[in-house]
Image (tube, rainbow, N blue to C red):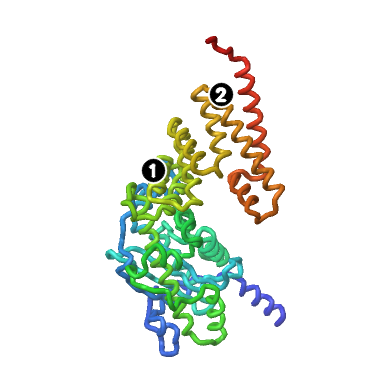
Amino acid sequence: MAASADRFARLSALKPTRLIVDRPLAQREPCEEDTLARLLGATVRRNHFGEHLAVSNWYSSPGFAHPSPVTLEILSGARDETLSRRTRDALSDPEKWLFLDTETTGLAGGTGTYAFLIGLAWWDAGGLQVEQIFMRDFAEEHSILSELAARIADRPVLLTYNGKTFDWPLLHSRFIMTRSIAPPKLIAHLDLLHPARAIWKLRLGTVRLSDLERHVLDPISLGWSRDDDTTSALIPQYYFDYLRGGPPEPLLGIAKHNQMDLRGLAALYYKLNTLIATELPEHGSVDGRDLFGLSRFLQRRGHRERAQTACTQALDFGLPHEVRPQARRDLALHAKRSGQHARAAKLWHEIIANDPEEGVHACEQLAIHYERRVKDHRQALEFAQRALAQLRKAKLLSTRLPAGHFAGAFAGALHVRISSSKESRVEKSLLHRIARLQQRLARTPIPLL
């Protein structure tokens, strides 16, 4: 009988946590024994699932910036007419926004990973209100998730940095695993990693939030420094050490790290809003490489006219030699797609004159232009043959010379935009075009003098 009761007791332990309906929502000051709470300056907050720590701070920077409609459209990746009224209203109302960043027991995710610190922030009184909810042990997970669900119910537009890939899937799985707290519904989720990567990776080579703060967001004006910042890779170990009875002091550095991430996230939104909403920045106010990255991001989001403007400005502001050919190529393609065929042809000619490594593609485009638009088959044939000759030259050099050789590098540059899988298709297309043009010219009568 005792063994049977023991088995039932173990099964009962697997049931979801029950609501403690007789305990009102409340918060209290920590007791003397709660060293971590006193160290963090936290209060002990209680809800229907139990207790957790909560830390609240208000910062005057970064200040509030109302989102421009075009910024919201571009960051959300959806045209205004495709959004429901509820989504449009929430996106355009910053009081519905919630910045989120988590600190977890592992960086790889998975069902065994917990979010032990959930950092939240929102605009309030012209500044940024930051709230951090912390679980002192795994038994408090239900309590912090319940708190998070309540916050998202009030502010269902989430802004994160890599949150679509890591933070939100992790939290969603933790909600599911509670079997008692339904995952909250998001109206929209703006992940700022994707525009940041498109715009700044070309110049910086990295898009870690701490690097963006240092090189893009101006940390002096933001009022903080990461000189003593906690390394992300050490955060899980510090928490596990604390759970095993270790010192709580390292968790203070984790809380500060999380606060800076939230403030950096808000500042990043401010920077993106300013950059996207300003159609004509002053010369020198923006790096040309950033504008080129912005133009490619705008193109992918379907804003072709603004992408063309940003690409033109990038060339005007100045680009490194290795980037300039691609910018000219993109600008020519913008002009072609928008029906500005004469301007596109002019740009292709400039590319051939200034950037021989782009010669194959530029010559091919000019062959198409003269055949289809100008109806000058002789010129079209000339450019098609030039494209084929350059393609074969690059192909020959790349097969004959060892990697790292100067000529081998030159061959690689000649067809930097033509991969080996595409090379044969381009060559076949050029041969077909040349044969067709030669046949047309052979049928053309020679005018009498």
Residue at (56% x, 27% y) in the render = 380
Residue at (61% x, 31% y) in the render = 385
Q: Secondary structure at mark 1?
A: helix
Q: Pinpoint residue 335: horizontal percent, then vertical percent.
A: 44, 36
User: How far apart in space, not on screen, are marks 1 and 2 (Cα)?
Assistant: 34 Å
Q: Residues within 10 Å of mark 2 (few under 14, many from 20)?
A: some
Point out the tag, 1 or 2, that comes first from the N-terminus: 1
- Residue type (three-letter) at the residue carrying disc 1: Thr
Image-based side of 203 in relation to 358, left or right: left
Residue closer to the observer: 104 or 45: 104
- Residue type (three-letter) at the residue carrying disc 2: Arg
Q: Quadrant of residue 29?
A: bottom left
Q: Which residue is mark 1?
A: 309
Image-based side of 430 in relation to 233, left or right: right
Image-based side of 218 in relation to 363, left or right: left
Q: Quadrant of residue 125?
A: bottom left
Q: Pinpoint residue 95: horizontal percent, then vertical percent.
A: 33, 58
Q: Quadrant of residue 284?
A: bottom left
